[in-house]
Image (tube, coloured by chain):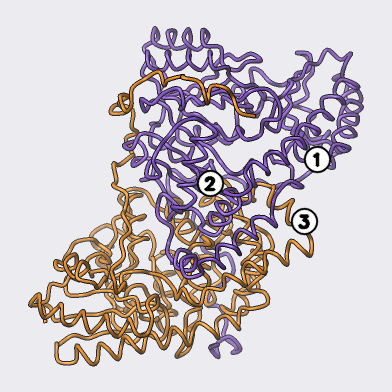
Chain colours: A orange, B purple
Amino acid sequence: MKSKWLDSDWNPTNMVGTFSYDKLFSRDSADTPLNPVAHAKYDFAVAYPAPETLPMDGLIQALQTAVDSNSEKVLAEMAYYPQQLGAIELREYTVQKLVTDRGFSVTSEELALTNGSGEALGLVIQALTNPGDIVLAEEFVYMGTTNQLRRFGADIRGVAIDDGGIIPEALEKQIIDLNSAGDKPKYLYTIPEHQNPTGSTLSEQRRRAILDIAHKYGMPILEDDCYVDLRYKGETQPAFRALDDSGIVVYVASYSKLLAPGLRLGYFTCSPDLMRRALSFKIGSGPNQFAAVAIEGFLKNNLDLHRDNFNPILEAKCNSMVDALEEHFHNSGAVWSAPQGGCYVWLTMPEDADIASIRDEVFDQGVGYVAGPNFEADGSGRIGKNCARLCFAFESVEKNSEGIALLAQLFKQHGVM
Amino acid sequence: MKSKWLDSDWNPTNMVGTFSYDKLFSRDSADTPLNPVAHAKYDFAVAYPAPETLPMDGLIQALQTAVDSNSEKVLAEMAYYPQQLGAIELREYTVQKLVTDRGFSVTSEELALTNGSGEALGLVIQALTNPGDIVLAEEFVYMGTTNQLRRFGADIRGVAIDDGGIIPEALEKQIIDLNSAGDKPKYLYTIPEHQNPTGSTLSEQRRRAILDIAHKYGMPILEDDCYVDLRYKGETQPAFRALDDSGIVVYVASYSKLLAPGLRLGYFTCSPDLMRRALSFKIGSGPNQFAAVAIEGFLKNNLDLHRDNFNPILEAKCNSMVDALEEHFHNSGAVWSAPQGGCYVWLTMPEDADIASIRDEVFDQGVGYVAGPNFEADGSGRIGKNCARLCFAFESVEKNSEGIALLAQLFKQHGVM
């Protein structure tokens, strides 16, 4: 039923853009430019799984099956605002998956689905962080989390890492030094499996040592396990959460890497009191039921098949990138990680090779990467200028080879190799 | 690739639930109980559209068509993290819909998709609200918004309303009184079309008067237009935003009512500087691409058909409820609204009939409603005990009739009628 004013010669009362908000913005608001998303020809800057393995048909089929088998139930659930914890079927499925894949058991009431793991991390960070609180993290770590930590006022300190991730002895020494200065860390954020950006995995032994340190100093561990399904080689290590039932571990994971980021479905589990506090920061209701129905329906019948399908593809892509690095970078003094899963190779050039400052030019010349300083936990710019994260998962095997060859050529051209 | 630890006799290091977070919670965190969602036999407490009109098959078909017509594009977009503004196709569609349905034009860069309109409201509220700021709203208004306003410290004041919504003269007097006391309102929140909970629609004349007041006192209008598609009678009134291009209007709307809350897709448009500030509060990336593809694909071919399908159903449901109220409440001194759309009938019993205090018992006896005090803008408990919001959209025509008959019987039993 259209109103006649739509066709009449009415005019807006006031001029375009004349109202000023200058004195109305809240103190906490920041004039942050929107991030334009651009992609290089060889896009190693992304953080995405392999699009060709994304089971769109399977997800759509799962939705259709759910509707066909119990239309009334699906319709009623879609018509409700999702519960704060999210769709019960996907929570129950996720709880089972955690038992099978991660070896720990929680109830579906102890698990909350979120709008991607980014929301889960943001909620927990808000529940635990006062401005000025010291938070520890791997010295190179996922910038989505450090961005959120900074926004809520955390003073992030990088913990020393090696090829095997966080070095427990260095962690404890750092805490002792903080204590000596009258400080203490509020919690530790870590990606223990296929770490972003370095690709390292913490051994069970190190995890147990870090847990002991956590208990000794009363420091919760915020475990980000979002890459665990992406292993094509080596052995999955036990989750921190599987090694510890005390409540000191907050476990966050995601369906973004296993299925697709565009589904925006992550989850977390932690002690009930912390979960209530975290959820009190939720804006709006639970995550979308539409994707939840599709994910639950698809994975309950296809998880192993799907992993068995995509992990060999990831491996081939990783190998193509590593082979190309060996071919084109072998005499450059560069080293790179040997991932057993995940999405990234971490490239470390000789210390004087500043590949951060030439990143934009190299991007325009066809190769995208994320420069090391973006991942620095403390944001100091002290380390990382000679490092880059290369995502091997998104481009094809052929483009990985071509792109790395071009990268070597461009690095030489820019005098950093 | 499973690890042997899954089958070994490892034990968690620490006991269940022994770690205490008591001294670790942030100052801003609140121990808020999770809302258990329960439904009465006759569920008039919901805020949902008619599930039988929800086009699940159409949405699924639209997804499949998108995949079949350009699989590579859809897969790549699903594999990316959504842009902050959300899927470009759905933004472009929404911009066109606003031109056609609401008579105003913005670019797709001036529109942001959000995880339901709740997220949009939360982002704008955070960008404009310092603790203690006075915010005006209809004296009975959507509690999802007042909950968020309170959480970010707003001092909400109710504006006098009648059957036609906000009374402009009362609004201006209230602002003048505030000014006399050295105060001023930061902004006005309003649901001008099929208001929640009262069902009223503001006339164009009142909107123009309110806009003049807004400009006179430098007070932005946060316009929540989420019920606009649900009109089966009378004439749609022009959006505030269509009457004013100055930037003073922030326009928020949603696909929750037109399609389904479970899709979690809302949107907002406002002046670019305010949008950047609002988006700076976003946690995680844009809303889910999966639902966005389905919505855009479905609506671009079916919007009118879909509205023409569901609005007569809403009307029949509304009529069944209003007819039942006339049959069972006609001698009670009660009055109720005569909605031309939306989801709700607003029931006002005689002033001494406290239907808020008996809400839980009536719920257990089979009829759910939301009592008036929940909608009080200022949360004072001063008004509304004799009022209730009855959702006519969710239950069937038959259940609406039966439920209202039972409600009358229960009110008599509880001595309030």
* Classed neighbour count for the residue bearing mark 3: other residues with Cα under 10 Å, few (<14), some (14–19), many (≥20): few
Q: Which amino acid type corresponds to the residue marked 1 in the rendered image?
A: Glu
Is B337 on the left-hand or right-hand side of B130? Answer: right
Q: Position of residue A326 (x, y in %)?
A: 24, 91
| Residue B229: quadrant of the picture | top right
Is A223 on the left-hand or right-hand side of A159? Answer: right
Residue at mark 3:
A73
* Classed neighbour count for the residue bearing mark 1: other residues with Cα under 10 Å, few (<14), some (14–19), many (≥20): many
Q: Output the chain of dot 1.
A: B
Q: Is residue A288 above or below residue A392?
A: above
Residue at mark 2:
A280
Q: Are marks 2 and 3 on the same chain?
A: yes
Q: Secondary structure at mark 3?
A: helix
Residue at mark 1:
B395
Q: Is residue A90 above or below residue B149?
A: below
Res A223 visible: no
Q: Which amino acid type corresponds to the residue marked 2 in the rendered image?
A: Ser
Q: Is residue B227 above or below residue B290?
A: above
Q: Position of residue B305 (x, y in %)?
A: 68, 43
* Classed neighbour count for the residue bearing mark 2: other residues with Cα under 10 Å, few (<14), some (14–19), many (≥20): many
Q: Which amino acid type corresponds to the residue marked 3 in the rendered image?
A: Lys
Distance from label 1 to label 2 (Cα)?
A: 30 Å
For the point 65% across and 45% down, the residue is: B35
